[in-house]
Amino acid sequence: MVSIPNIIFYVLVFLSVYVQVFFLVTFLENRKKIITRNGKIKLAKYPSVTITVPCWNEEDTLEKTVLSLLNLNYPKDKIKIIIVDDGSTDNTWKIINSFASYPNIRVFRKENEGKYTALNLGLHNSDTDFFGCLDADSLVHPESLVRIMSYFEKDPNSMAVTPALLVYDPQSVIQKVQKAEYNMGIYLKKMLGFLGAIHVTPGPLTIFRRKVFDELGPYRHAHNTEDMEIAYRMQKNHYKIEQCNDAYVYTNTPLTIRKLYKQRLRWVYGFINNTIDYKDILLSRKYGNFSFFTLPAAIVSIIAAGYFFSKLVYNLGNILYSKIIQFQLVGYIAKTADFDLFFVNAQSLVFITIFLFVLVIFSIMVGKKITDNQSKISLDMFYFPIIYSILAPLWIIKAVYNTVLSRSPDWR
């Protein structure tokens, strides 16, 4: 008789495979629609765009961020930059003031009230038909904005376009792992774009039609994940979100495991609580793939990660306990380990695990391919799934714990 834990295990394994295969099928159906542009492009018209840079203690990266905006290949009189100091305590305001004399830059300083309030200040002081944000720890490729705007020119129904996020100058092992993760993220986001099911419009250079905020209202606190909540709100109101796979934005990622843990804890906590806030969307036909695929798939991944990790810890605990009992009864017995293929576990779950691993590597390679036309194999592709299978359950379990106890995680 199959036990309930085993039933849960097999169901979660099946759903995990289903999600990966669904992405693969979506890619195979839409691969000819993916275009990666290497040179400059021209638009029939160049709409005015406001880009707000919210800052809180960003003295190390802010200057490069603003300079990258000034170097965009877009008519200078069509770009308005608003820099908002959200109560920084370092030299951020001094750096901001060094740009105050530029004709297309406006600067503001306010008390620290959160990123969403800084964005809303920029929104309130903008008068263009398009509005976007650039996090102060990110750099934009010179062609990124014009490529994003080409999506709006092509489709009047597009309400927001997200960029291709890449890791800037990875140094540590943790950053190189994130490099692989971000490449996979480009692939997944592009597939979700085809499905009309994108669930987050990231801070680094997502561009919106101003109509979105005029009709749906400004940014909200949203558990410190305002870029996720606005995407949920757009999906609820059937606003189209696309992904531009060749609009490159390079972002500084956490250098250490501790900083990565705090960042991902905030992201997962935000997902859980935004999903709770929008629970009426879940599994409702009128919200399409966002309701029936994106949210359920993310929920399954959270449950699966927590369950598999708990099962692993439980099994290791049992093994350790049996070894302790054995040692107490008969003492230490040295054994010679002779490898024999006869003892290799050939159960179907082993092959399923290998299959999932291959799909992850494939998704990373496709992410690289649709971003810069390269799909070379690198080591970070292989140790990404291994390292994250250990780390991810930690921040997932903690995010669930914080949600139960209504404890909001720190921003940094």
Image (cartoon, rainbow, N blue to C red):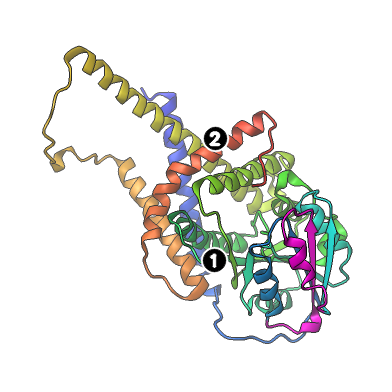
Name which quarter of the figure residue 1 lies in.
top left
Cα separation, mark 2 vs mark 1, equals: 29 Å
Position of residue 171 measured from the top left corner of the image (x, y, whole percent): 46, 61
For the point 77% across and 67% down, which residue is it? 96
Magenta segment range?
A: 73-102
Query: Residue 33, how many percent across, how many down?
Result: 56, 73
Number of numbered markers: 2
In this view, the residue in front, 90 or 43, is 90
Report the side of 1 relative to 101 (left or right): left
Q: Residue shown at 52%/54% (left/top)?
A: 255
Q: Amino acid at mark 2?
A: Ile
The amino acid type of the residue labelled 1 equals: Tyr
Q: In the shown orientation, is residue 136 left or right of residue 102?
A: left
Q: Is residue 389 left or right of residue 275?
A: left
Nearer to us in this view, 10 or 150: 150
As drawn, the label of residue 397 is 2
Disc 2, disc 1: CB below 8 Å? no
Crowding at dot 1, Cα within 10 Å, few <14 / some 14-19 / many 20+, comes out as: some
Question: Can you give x and y, in whole percent of width and height, for residue 319 in the image?
Answer: 30, 25
**In terms of depth relative to the viewer, which is nearer, 22 or 128?**
128
Give the residue at mark 1: 168
Above or below, 219 against 278 in this view is below
245 in the magenta segment: no
Specify whether residue 86 is painted magenta: yes
Determine which of the numbered discs, if any, sits on residue 97 in the image.
none
Q: Secondary structure at mark 1?
A: loop
